[in-house]
Image (spheres, rainbow, N blue to C red):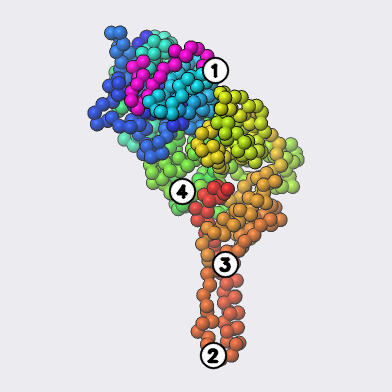
Amino acid sequence: MKNIRNFCIIAHIDHGKSTLADRLLQTTGAVDGKDLQAQVLDDMDLERERGITIKSHAIRMDYTFEGQEYVLNLIDTPGHVDFSYEVSRSIAACEGALLVVDATQGIQAQTISNLYMAIEHNLEIIPILNKMDMDAAMPEIVKDQIIELLGGKTEDIIEASGKTGMGVDEILRRIVKDVPPPEGDPNAPLQAMIFDSVFNSYRGIIAYIKIINGTIRTGDHVKFFNTDKDYEADEIGVLRLKPDPAKELSTGAVGYIISGIKTSKEVKVGDTITHFDRPCKAAISGFEEVKPMVFAGVYPIEATDYEELRASLEKLQLNDASLTFEPESSAALGFGFRCGFLGLLHMEIVQERLDREFDMNVITTVPNVSYKVYDKKTNVHEVHNPSGLPDAREIDYIEEPYIEAQVITNTDFYGAIMKLCLTKRGELLKEHYLAANRVELTYTMPLAEIVFDFYDKLKSISKGYASFDYHQIGFRKANLIKLDILLNGESVDALSTLIHFDNAYTLGRKMVDKLQELIPRQQFDIAVQAAIGAKVIARSTIKAVRKDVTAKCYGGDITRKRKLLEKQKKGKKRMKQVGNVEVPQNAFMAVLKLD
């Protein structure tokens, strides 16, 4: 046990941690030959295409140092703010962390938030300055930022490059020397924490575990603490590039267990596995529950695919524990699910994965956050969907979730970023200069304002240099109203939104104009209206597809033409009453991207 080291890599998105992980695996011989490729641990096509890590991945390396054999378990983590839950799970399974900072960009917001998470779990932090081979590197400035953040000495910071392999040997030496071995008692009752799980269509559910106390052997009779189900451990093993079966796993080891579980509800990330005959007294604590920030309806395009969509979401939830869902129905879209996501990128990734991995084509409604609605009898309703609002006459007031956001930026973009935050109803709490030309701004703002396009706008006005991180700080009273979209007088519940009173008219106008462009023309005029309660605040008309029906009435009396037009008018009227206006999926998506 004293020769085991469990560590993770934490960094902001695009600071080169996947490349650095590749070099560590190559140096220790964990990956070689044809398996050696860029982003080895990112095994999803989506991750490679976008160049981001979505899932945390665990892999074991064998390393010899001063004549001793060491086992290094690396857990690679994502860097985007939307996947911070993945990071928290990886940190819970480690004793040390490599803090990777890009020498060309310096400390970024996500680096700070992940670092605080690691410090809370008492992890040993090893600071690394990556991308030192680049001409734009500014090691002295960035080292000062790291020292200010972490303390310690400048010589403790390792200069490295994931591309050239510089500093990798030093990193491995420091992991062995500085990261403490796991603590625990191999003879105590078994306590193993599930930190991730995947679904395999042949083997069932594979749970990734870290053993805190005790020892597990192949064939043991085990029980899951929280779900109270028991199984045989058909296969256990360690996580190399491919699962590698082993006879036993002892305290401190990171590995996997296959016990032929087919039902996804029976495996919960954060659960504790123990022996059936000799159970441990309590479950492992300190594992945080996921809090979805953004809610959206996900509906199958074909109503008959509802059960298939449920099965797909359950399998996806195994692999992505931060996804939550519950059934709901909509007048416009039929039966579907109300899903909770950590952010807009997370929502986009889930939609993409449903399409690629499960061949499910879905419609996603306008995302929104959860609100607390107080009625006049002082009852509280938690509302995730504007159509779930009580009657406007019964509502006393509405509270919306607020966040505290940290934005770290170059001082050149200071004014533009402050203007953006103010338009999003932000209030400046404090500003802190990290260096002469870098400033950290802390704002409180409503979560609903950053859900749509805040991150994209921040990136574009700062030319990609500003970074952003946030956490929820509770609910505050707000002047919110429900904005409905009507097509031919019928409300489309999937397009209704809760919005601040001041922004209602502008958003209503934009939505109506956008829908006029996107909804295909029918045989009759379609009225597109935005309304607050019974009051219509914006309208536009989608003109009917016209055909000159009087072309064949040449010559003769005008009454012939008039009679034909009257007949047409009646037909149009009847068509309008029974006509069904289809809203295409791109119309739902375009509403999100309204500027």
In the image, 560 versus 327, the foreground residue is 560
Q: Quadrant of residue 428?
A: top right
* Mark 1 or mark 4, earlier in chain: 1
Amino acid at dot 2: Gly
User: Which label sits in the foreground, 1 or 2?
Assistant: 1
What label does residue 362 carry, if any? 4
Taking the view exactly as shown, the residue that stands out farthest to the left is 33
Alpha-carbon neighbours of circle 4 within 10 Å: few (<14), some, or many (≥20)? many
Q: Could you tell me which secondary element the residue under label 2 belongs to?
A: loop
Q: Which contiguous range is marked in magenta?
A: 146-170
Q: Which residue is mark 1?
A: 148
Please check the rendered image and state whether residue 409 is part of the magenta-colored stretch, yes or no.
no
Residue at image position (40%, 36%) is: 51
Q: Estimate the x, y position of residue 60 in percent, counting from the top left.
A: 33, 21
Amino acid at dot 4: Val
Q: Which residue is mark 3?
A: 543
Q: Could you tell me which secondary element the residue under label 4 belongs to?
A: strand
Mark 1–mark 4 distance (CA, rounded to whole Å):
48 Å
What label does residue 555 carry, if any? 2
Q: Are marks 1 and 2 in contact (CB under 8 Å)?
A: no
Residue at image position (35%, 34%) is: 43
Residue at image position (58%, 51%) is: 495
* Mark 4 or mark 3, earlier in chain: 4
Residue 564 in sight here: yes
Alpha-carbon neighbours of circle 1 within 10 Å: few (<14), some, or many (≥20)? few
Q: Are marks 2 and 3 in contact (CB under 8 Å)?
A: no
* Mark 3 or mark 1, earlier in chain: 1
Q: Quadrant of residue 97?
A: top left
